Amino acid sequence: MTTYAVGDLQGCYRTLQKLLKRIEFDPANDTLWLVGDLVNRGPRSLDVLRWARDLGDRIVAVLGNHDLHLLARAEGLVEKRKGDTLDDVLKAKDRDDLLAWLRGLPFVHRENGFLLVHAGLHPAWSVETIDRLARDAEARMRSEGSAFLAKIAGRLKDGEATEPSLSRDLVETLRAVATFTRIRTCHDDGTPCTGFSGPPREAPPGCRPWFQVPGRRTASETVVFGHWSALGLHVEARLLALDTGCVWGNDLSAVRLSDRMVFQQSFVD
């Protein structure tokens, strides 16, 4: 069995299918790890969701910020944004089934020394802390539904809770969700540098990529993530960054986890 990790899809279904042919993906034996942001801004979010749902346990996927945006829009918690391409999902006859599947995805997947997350991790978190925070957020997604989505969508801004009445535990969970799905750069104490999405060399003073903070506690794990298209493909011994901006007309990237072999497919509309 072979496991491949694939970068942000964002509705780029045709490009994905060409990439799967390139890697000779066999759904009977192989597994795909998806770094989140399955939907939005690309042309075929509905096709991507149906494909992923139908592959069952051959898919391991985590939630990204665009996936959360879709869930929040479906609940009427946020307005349509400029550039959204989610109407086909929201109007689909099987939307409820698709959204239920999406809502059940984890924020972090950990297996055999690999950590799969959409955006990144707080440098001070141990794997035990990450597991605890992710499992709490996932339990709230299941048990609190739209109420928890509302807190994510409306009461959290750039990693900081804006509602003073929230409990300490809930604030911690909301900050974790923001980190899992949105972080790119941070200060050395892990405080996120908000509003920056450019390449690392242009980061504001005092900010560095979250994975370059000295003493990061997950340095012994191999972290697989996406979200940061301006970073692009970044492969190290313990780091696989896979968002190469397919939705912007660039390549879709995959890495075979066993040997770090990279496969890429240029964008197809």
Image (cartoon, grey):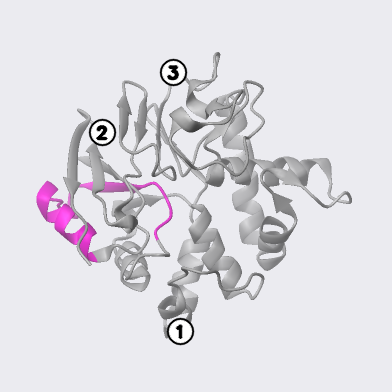
Q: Amino acid at mark 3?
A: Ser
| 200 relative to 172, above or below | above
Q: Amino acid at mark 1?
A: Lys
Residue 220 vs residue 259: left or right? Answer: right
| Residues tagged 3 and 1 counted as in contact (Cβ below 8 A) | no
Q: Which residue is mark 2?
A: 257
Residue 240, x across and y down, in percent: 34, 32
Residue 54 vs residue 264: left or right? Answer: right
Marks 3 and 1, the one that precedes in the sequence: 1
Where are the magenta residues, as a range?
Answer: 14-38
Q: Which mark is residue 187?
A: none
Q: Which residue is mark 3?
A: 220
Mark 3 vs mark 1: in front: 1
**Distance (Cα) linking label 3 and label 2:** 16 Å
Quadrant showing the C terminus: bottom left
Q: Residue at x 88, y 49 (%)?
A: 164
The residue nearer to you, when weighing 26 against 92, is: 92
**Distance (Cα) linking label 3 and label 1:** 44 Å
Q: Secondary structure at mark 1?
A: helix
Q: Which residue is mark 1?
A: 91
Residue 80 vs residue 191: left or right? Answer: left
Q: Secondary structure at mark 2?
A: loop
Residue 28, x across and y down, in percent: 17, 54
